[in-house]
């Protein structure tokens, strides 16, 4: 019997339920970004939520990350690089906007 895998994300419990539902619709890249932002920039992330700007910021960041990592890896000359190296090369900020 396989062990149960935990697929829960921090944003599901740390943000308002309406915000979490909207993030769920954005897909896995946005889920990872939301959790990264909450773990590293909690106050700024919660401030964005209070201002009603979090979901749009996540949407934009997830789109940008997906495009950059896809471009870098699929037949690209940077396919051998780790994620953090690709992010640095493309000036991709790991945190939420100020």
Image (cartoon, grey):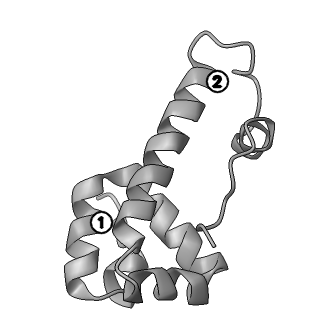
Q: In the picture shown, does residue 12 fall above or below 46?
A: above
Q: Which residue is painted at 68% across and 47% down in the image?
A: 92
- Secondary structure beneath label 2: helix
Q: Which residue is painted at 59% across and 90% down in the image?
A: 43
Residue beneath disc 2: 72
Residue 27 placement (x, y as % from top left): 30, 52
As rendered, which of 78 and 67 lies closer to the eye? 67
> Is 73 displayed left or right of 56 in the figure?
right
Residue 97 placement (x, y as % from top left): 60, 67
Residue 71 placement (x, y as % from top left): 57, 22
As rendered, which of 56 and 24 lies closer to the eye? 56
> Is 5 displayed left or right of 90 in the figure?
left
Instruction: Say whether residue 84 is visible.
Output: yes
Q: Which residue is painted at 57% across and 68% down in the image?
A: 36
For label 1, the crowd category at 10 Å Cα-Cα, with few meaning under 14, some 14 to 19 and many 20 or more, is many
> Is 55 displayed left or right of 63 in the figure?
left
Residue beneath disc 1: 23
> Is 57 displayed left or right of 75 in the figure?
left
Lower position in the chain sequence, tag 1 or tag 2: 1
Image mark for residue 48: none
Q: Are marks 1 and 2 in contact (CB under 8 Å)?
A: no
**Which quadrant holds residue 6?**
bottom left
Residue closest to the far top: 75
Q: Gap in Å between the C-alphas at discs 1 and 2?
A: 25 Å
Q: In the picture shown, does residue 26 fall above or below 75?
A: below
- Quadrant location, the N terminus: bottom left
Residue 47 placement (x, y as % from top left): 50, 88
Q: In the picture shown, does residue 64 fall above or below 25?
A: above
- Secondary structure beneath label 1: helix
Q: Which residue is painted at 79% across and 40% down in the image?
A: 85
- Quadrant location, the C terminus: bottom right
For label 2, the crowd category at 10 Å Cα-Cα, with few meaning under 14, some 14 to 19 and many 20 or more, is many
């Amino acid at each position: 019997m396989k062990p149960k895998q935990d697929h829960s994300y921090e944003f599901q419990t740390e943000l308002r339920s309406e915000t979490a539902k909207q993030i769920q619709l954005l897909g896995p890249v946005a889920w990872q970004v939301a959790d990264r932002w909450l773990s590293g920039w909690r106050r700024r992330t919660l401030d964005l939520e209070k201002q009603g700007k979090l979901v749009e910021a996540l949407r934009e960041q997830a789109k940008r990350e997906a495009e950059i990592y896809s471009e870098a890896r699929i037949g690209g000359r940077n396919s051998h690089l780790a994620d953090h190296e690709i992010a640095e090369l493309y000036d991709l900020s790991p945190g939420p906007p100020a």
